Amino acid sequence: MKKTLIGLAICSIAVSCTTHQKVVQVKPQIQKVEKEEQTLKRKVAIARFSNETQYAKGIFYDKDNDPIGKQAVDILSTKLASTNKFILLERQDMDKILEEIKLAGNEGYQKVGADYLIIGSVTEFGRKNVGDVNAFSRSKTQIVQAGVSIRLIDVSTGQIIYSEEAKGEAETTNKTVMGLGERTDYDATLSDKAISAAISKLVENIINNCMNRPWKSYFLTYNEDGILISGGKSQGLKVGDKFEVFEKGKSVKNPQTGMMMELPGKFVGIIKIDFTGGDNPQNEFSMISFTEGSIDKRNLNNYYIKEVK
């Protein structure tokens, strides 16, 4: 009987000697998504992501090779790509791409501009240990906190359309009772998890601010062979989709802001996608037909195509 009780006591102690991890996301409040399903993709590039904290900045620190900044870029790129709502354009390692193009002798390289630029920084990063010692047990908690700030910029105007800061926290705890239990060493993965948690809070707001702004396309050609517009499958265009066509409004300078602004365009018709072609965002096109209205085919630059809301 005594052996049974001792066995049960040891099992109870073993169960209590646990190690667990927790990732906490805090700030900011997520904006409500007005339209859940948006298929038309926007072109987005991450221009810069820097480490503005003092973490890991020793005498040999190289700001152009900062592991925290590069890690933040990779995490954000992965999370944005997984949403399948953007065409992501590389900017961080552009020099490596240009070097490969030069080695391959590829003269057909096309420079593609983004609709939106993301500029960000890691503004807060810290680690602390919290311990608790009792008569028969002791516990130790490792906590890492990270803060990330980003700005989303409309390339066509240079205007910051969204700016936010978010914080993430990751922790791991181990507990021993009467000397029994696993003791954890320094956990380097908590840094990754804290930064990822902070960035995760910002991704949905980036999506909202990009997708709530109208997707636009433009006419490429208009002749006897057909009418072509830019954009294809990778941007979410499908055969049968309909879009509105507008004549561009007059451009005027706003005396209050000093910025050029385009006045509302004039609705001139509706088009339907008949065929999509091309194999990448640079050369994709769609053949269309007018179901309502028409345009002056001699002045294609005076018009733009917008999604129907």
Image: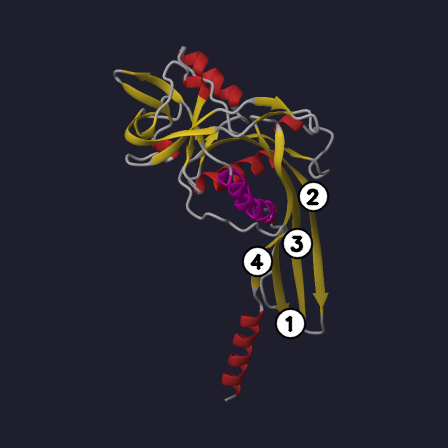
User: Closer to the N terminus: mark 4 or mark 2?
Assistant: 4
Residue 178 — which label? Answer: 1
Relative height, residue 19 to residue 241 (above, below): below
Element type at mark 1: loop
Please tell me whether the stretch drawn in magenta is mainly helix, strand or loop. Answer: helix
Instruction: Please determine whether, in this image, residue 203 is positioned above or below residue 230.
Output: below
Sequence-wise first label, 2 or 1: 2
* Image quadrant where residue 304 sits: top left
> Which corner quadrant of the image does residue 291 belong to?
top left
Determine the residue positioned at 65% across, 46% down. 146
Q: Earlier in the sequence, mark 1 or mark 4?
A: 4
Sequence-wise, which precedes: disc 2 or disc 3? 2
Whether pointer 3 and pointer 4 mark residues with C-beta atoms closer than 8 Å, the reply is no
Horizontally, is 234 left or right of 32 in the view?
A: left
**Label 2 CA crowd tier, 10 Å (few <14, some 14–19, many 20+):** some
Residue type, label 3 = Ile
Q: Which mark is residue 258?
A: none
Few, some or many residues within 10 Å of mark 4 (<14, 14–19, 20+): few
Report helix, strand or loop for mark 3: strand
What distance separates the C-alpha of mark 4 from that of mark 2?
A: 21 Å
Q: Position of residue 208 (x, y in %)?
A: 52, 43
194 inside magenta stretch: yes
Residue 253: name its quadrant. top right
Specify the amino acid type for callout 1: Met
Of residues 16 and 294, which is closer to you in this image? 294
Q: Given the image, on which type of amino acid does mark 4 rest? A: Gln
Start and end of the magenta stretch?
192-212
157 or 233, nearer to the observer: 157
Q: Residue 124 bears which disc, if any?
A: 2
Q: Is residue 200 magenta?
A: yes
